[in-house]
Image: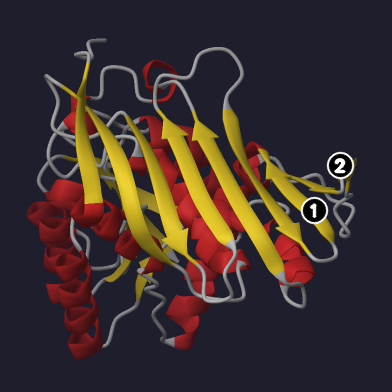
Amino acid sequence: MKIALVGIGKIARDQHVPAIADSPDWELAATCSNHGTVEGIEAHKDFGAMLAARPDIQVISLCLPPVPRFAYAAQAIAAGRHVMLEKPPGATLSECHALEEMARAKGVTLYASWHSRAAAQVQAAKAWLKDKTLRSLNVTWKEDVRRWHPGQDWIFEAGGLGVFDPGINALSIMTEILPDPIHVTGAELDFPENRETPIAARVAFFHPKGAEVTMDMDFLQTGEQIWSMEAVTDQGTLSLHKGGAVLENDGKDVADASGVNLSLKGEYPVLYAHMAELVRAGRSDVDLAPMRHVADAFTLGRRLTVAPFDW
């Protein structure tokens, strides 16, 4: 199937382009971006003009920042194209619900992708926790914004989510692996005095069976990058590290049962394979649970002003 990639930035170059190139399902037929291109691929700057010029491209993958994404997705759906959304699927829950309705009315596929759910050991963790009684889940998600989002001011502007941009990856894993639903009960959000989104946060959750569930996020982590969660249960402790790529049970590594060593770069091929399945089956997949937790954290969170942030 022919696909167009919209928004040629770091995540597109690092993940989307290689995943599409290696897939038997897809042909990257065009790109649309104000600044970036992909060598050897037809490039556009006007999205509407691209849609008009290329009716043969039936699938659009949007890699734009969250705030402008709705307008592009709505335009693509109106033109009868299937749409795949990079995480988070929009700037607000209302936008995402509106896109769902548009896609349903138009009879096209809409896929809100969560790449961390495709990490190598997430499904193994989900299976292990299924029949256990959870006592606590502690999530630590700390990375260096200067390394992963160099100079990307949009992430600190309203709608950019700040530290919740990577933190929502943890939330996507939590909502996938936990057998019981949770919700936010409180949060502390550290806002640099010169920015509009938080640079660090601590979040507490309600668990229906009384387990303690917490999350600690920081965008100023130097040295080792930490994307980990530890679940203590009545039958031992499960730990996920490196964003879900490594699984430990009571401190011992658990090998991937498939025998395939999937790295973080293995996540996006899984997403594009799922998108191909959805299009062929005429279905959509729009799970907004991670976004609900972010919205609740912003609603309930106590705002703390911290030192200014500059690149």
Q: Is residue 147 left or right of residue 9?
A: right
Q: Residue at x 29, y 53 (%)?
A: 297
Q: Position of residue 76 (x, y in %)?
A: 18, 66
Q: Residue at x 74, y 47 (%)?
A: 239
Q: Is residue 202 left or right of residue 24?
A: left
**Residue 166 visible within the image:** yes
Q: Position of residue 259 (x, y in %)?
A: 90, 53
Residue 205 or residue 60, whichever sits in front: 205
Dot 1, how many residues are within 10 Å of its Cα: few (below 14), some (14-19), or many (20+)? some
Q: In the rendered view, would you say 139 is above or below 88?
A: above
Residue 137 or residue 259, whichever sits in front: 137
Dot 2, how many residues are within 10 Å of its Cα: few (below 14), some (14-19), or many (20+)? few
Specify the color scheme.
secondary structure
Label 2: which residue? 251
Per the image, label 1 sits on a secondary structure element best described as: strand
Q: Residue at x 12, y 74 (%)?
A: 78
Residue 49 or residue 298, whichever sits in front: 298
Q: Residue at x 41, y 76 (%)?
A: 285
Q: Is residue 193 left or right of residue 208?
A: left
Label 1: which residue? 237
Q: Position of residue 129 (x, y in %)?
A: 73, 68
Q: Position of residue 157 (x, y in %)?
A: 14, 33
